[in-house]
Image: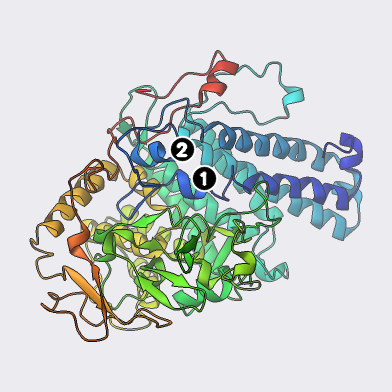
Amino acid sequence: MAAFSTEEAFSNVTLATDAVMGVYARLTGDNGYGIRVSMYYPYDNDEMLGAPNSTAALDGDRRDIARYGATASNTQLETPFEQMYQGIERANICIKYIPLMSQYTSGSAADQASLKRLLGEVLTLRAQFYFELMRNWGDVPAQFVPSADMPTLVIPKTDRDVIYDHILNDLLTAEPLLPWRTDAGVTRDERITKGVAKGLRARFALFRGGYALRTDSKIMERRADYLKYYQIAKDECTDIIASGAHTLNASYKNLWQNYVDAHTPDPTGEIMFEVAMAGGNGTGDSKLGYYNGPRMMNGSSTYGNSTLLILPTYFYAFDPNDTRRDVTVAPYYFNLDGTKVLQKLTSMYDGKFRRDWISNPSFNSLTFSLSQYFSVNWPILRYSDILLMYAEADNELSNGPTANAINYFTQVRSRGFGGGAIGTIPATHDAFFQAIVNERSFEFGGEGIRKYDLIRWNLLNTNILATRANLTLMMNKQAPYANLPQSMFYTTGQQTIVYSNSLYAPAPSSTPAGTTKIAWVSAITNTGTVPYIDFVAKYFTPNHSELLPIPQPSLDANPLLTQNPGY
């Protein structure tokens, strides 16, 4: 956009499209969903740990974010905060000037349709940037016009409820401007469609109606009118489901291995919107598969960071027949020939973006051994979320699930079990809500959703404490973990992990012939410089840690900007 005057940038549809693509670009790279927003900020939670500590000291970096010990001077906060505002500024310019183009009102039918779509896209993108700011930082300064039109850029925070209401209205404006996926000839969901705007509006409404750490009271609260927003969420999900534009992929594993990691469009449209990554650099690409997931081994050399760790309690929360466990969890390193090396129970990795599944091209070879950017897209919204959001909203509005809510919940769970038996679905409000809490964990593990779900339900502190308590029970061989194996044995040199003993029964007393022994439950300890259990979300403090600190450079630049509670 900087290479053209404003008049030139919005002189025709092609250049206006380029300007909107520049807004999309602010979602990408190291300071977007390429690593920091997707893999630093959402952890620790009750599923996974962020970057583990090697010492007990705070480091002013990503580990402090994971342990909830970040300060305003943390080096990983300022640039993502700024990049989101850069996206908002670019969006504001597009939102102002696209409707002023002559083609918007008097161009050909094709030009008018294209420009209306662009306006709908950029209204939705601006809403997403504000949503990401609010779920991490709470109340933030908000402007909805270009900076050149502002009397001053030194402005105070705007209450998040005001921002939420604004972006909910923006999305309502965007919806009729956008085509359904099936009407747009979309082959890859890297651009926003009507279903995306509706789905994000449902998500934002649930957050607007959920709990949040309030600037005025400095405690977690939910507004009295929250059911109004649950109704918005239900209505939007109803429209998406009725449209038929999106469906569940029949295979949970194929969704990730054959589509996301294979750089291939999902033909079912389950992945409704994903951030398009490319370029092999920190500006426009992602480190998915490098920063997280299992490492590649070549003798004594390893490639990749394997930084996000699965908690043992999360692994064992899955039903043994739930196919999502072995997609979400990758308990191994892998060799160049594809053979797997089992890791101990406390060193399992998130598996949806695993390097050994990446193809077209593949990065599990020495040719790409030093690569850090694999152009794997980050999914923002999936159709399974639409089904579960409907179920959640309906349960609240009806004080218990209706037949539709149970049906949509069942669709998600049945797919996870490969069509097998899933047991009885609860029919009362409280039990169904707990089932939703659990199901969203099984469905979205490793997708940057869980921490924020727990915050809007005001369950983050509760579940962190429960996780530490359950890890202690597991370590001490107490119920419900009393019969788990202290060690696992597996056959080396295989393309898949071949266990020689059960994951759900005590281990044999001697090593079976031809197998290798790996510490399993015995790997859980709580001693030493960095006690494993104590360091799960170690510095989390209720009514404080639900938000990140406002970055110090932003505070310094804006004297009206105030810090979040407790920082």
Q: Is 139 placed above or below 25 here?
A: above
Which residue sits at x=46%, y=25%?
Answer: 72
At label 2, counting other C-alpha atoms closer than 10 Å, the crowd grade (few under 14, some 14-19, many 20 or more) is some
- Residue 449 position (above or below residue 55): below
- Work out whether residue 111 or residue 148 is closer to the camera in this orientation and state it: 148
Determine contact: label 2, label 1, CB under 8 Å: yes
Q: Give the position of the C terminus as an image quadrant.
A: top left
Q: Nearer the viewer, residue 449 or 404?
A: 449
- What's the mark number on residue 327? none
Q: How many discs appear? A: 2
Determine if residue 232 is in view.
Answer: yes
**What residue is pinned by disc 2?**
136
- Please identify the quadrant where the N terminus is shown: top right
Residue visible at 35% across and 68% down in the picture? 331
Kindly identify which residue carries mark 1: 37
Image-quadrant location for residue 557: top right
State how the image is colored: rainbow
Residue 368 spot, x, y in % from top left: 63, 65
Instruction: Say whether residue 276 is left or right of residue 116.
Output: left
